[in-house]
Amino acid sequence: MFCIHFSNRSEAVIFYNAIVSEQKLWLFKEHGDRYEVKLISTSLSGTAYVESIRAFLQLIRKRKMLGWMEGVLKHKYYYQDDQEIQRILEIARDFEDKPPSGLKLPPIYHYIRAFIQDYLIARTFVKFDDMSAECLQAAHACIIEYTGKVIDEYKQEESYQLLLDSWRHRVHDQDTGIQLMHLLDEDGLIYFHDEGNPISESETRLYMKQYPDKSIDDLPLEWPVTTALVHSPDQLVIYSDESNDSNLELLMNIFEEKASWRPKSQFPFKMA
């Protein structure tokens, strides 16, 4: 008989529930503060072996991985601020569902799966706490590398947030003399003066020189947000029937109370 001991009931339940097609061959038992999941058949083989590997991997991902990473953050990368640590772990949790496109992550779960496969061979008894500790030791270098990738993403997020704050300061503090601008979402984003004439690239280029700012120096003129940042009007009225356009959402986020959203039907000018 193959038996697994758990010191934590939740972990025992997660493992037991992760066994799908062969669950009738497994027993879940409680003994005070100790919990057991037993395989009725004589040995761990065939489908039971395959499902055990999958269940252990799922359990480690759910219950151990972030704890291991937290230890690496504190003792390898020397993070101490709890808010920073929690944000990095949140990003790591997001990586589980959808890692950023183009980012090559170390194959940490490949190593963990390989460790579990080797660990279970010819065993009749497993203490999950011991197994997970040995797994951490075996995958430690990979966990450090993986955590480093998550930290890189966190630093990029921090840098973007600082840039976002600098854009907010610009549009709220910079007086360019422009009181009101209109932005129409019509086969692209088109900006208009309050008199109804479109804003040209040459005007935007001129305002970039007249009101210089490091936060906008390198922005491409073709990016739809650039014109609003450069001209920094006291009020920006957006006319759009789309509720999930990322550029418009960004503008609302930057301009805050200086921006308002209206349906396209309320656009006050006639298009040429």
Image: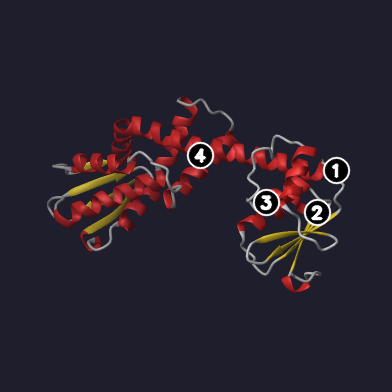
Where is mark 3, residue-wise? 225
Where is mark 4, residue-wise? 153
Q: Give the structural element (helix, strand or loop) at label 3.
A: loop
Q: Is residue 182 above or below residue 170?
A: below
Q: Give the structural element (helix, strand or loop) at label 4.
A: helix
Q: CA distance from mark 4 to mark 1?
A: 34 Å
Label 2 neighbourhood size at 10 Å, few (<14), some (14-19), many (20+)? some
Label 4 neighbourhood size at 10 Å, few (<14), some (14-19), many (20+)? some
Quarter of the image with the C terminus in it:
bottom right
> In this view of the protein, can residue 32 be seen by the observer?
no
Q: How is the image coloured?
A: secondary structure
Residue 200 on image: x %, y %: 74, 54
Q: Is residue 68 left or right of residue 137?
A: right
Disc 1 residue type (three-letter)? Asp
Residue 106 on image: x %, y %: 35, 38
Where is mark 2, residue-wise? 258
Q: What's the mark number on residue 156?
A: none
Labels 4 and 1: the sequence-earlier one: 4
Determine the residue positioned at 65% across, 54% down: 224
Q: Is residue 272 above or below residue 153?
A: below
Determine the residue positioned at 44% across, 36% down: 149
